[in-house]
Image: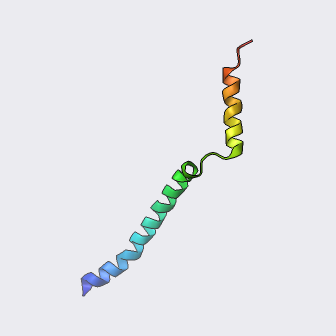
Amino acid sequence: MMFMTHLVLMTPGWVGIALAISLMLWLLFQPYFQGQAPAERRAATLLRSMLKAPAQ
């Protein structure tokens, strides 16, 4: 009986840890799932064109 009580009391802690880790993973990988926003594409294109421009 003591084991079951200990298990029930520990479970919310593990659930909290799992939720925190899954939230961090979601925030980390979300930009890769959505792709780039139009503003990011424009900025990347501008940077690429500036780097390709001949030096004067």
Q: Residue at x 41, y 75 (%)?
A: 12
Q: Give the image location of residue 43, x and y in percent.
A: 70, 36
Q: Is residue 32 above or below residue 47?
A: below
**Count of numbered badges drawn on the protein:** 0
Residue at 70% from the left image edge and 26% from the top image edge: 49
| Residue 44 % position (x, y) | 66, 35
Q: What is the x, y in percent for residue 23? A: 51, 61
**Which colour scheme appears in the figure?**
rainbow
The answer to which image quadrant residue 39 occupies is top right
Looking at this view, name the residue that lies furthest to the bottom: 1
Judge by depth and name the residue closer to the eye, 7 or 40.
40
Q: Determine whether 39 is above or below 10 in the image.
A: above
Q: Residue at x 60, y 47 (%)?
A: 35
The quadrant of the rendering that contains the C terminus is top right
Taking 31 as reference, is 17 above or below it?
A: below
Q: Residue 2 location in percent, x, y? A: 25, 85
Q: Quadrant of the N terminus?
A: bottom left
Quarter residue 52 falls in: top right
16 vs 52, nearest the viewer: 52
Residue nearest the viewer, comparing 9 with 54:
54
**What is the residue that sits farthest to the top in this orientation?**
56
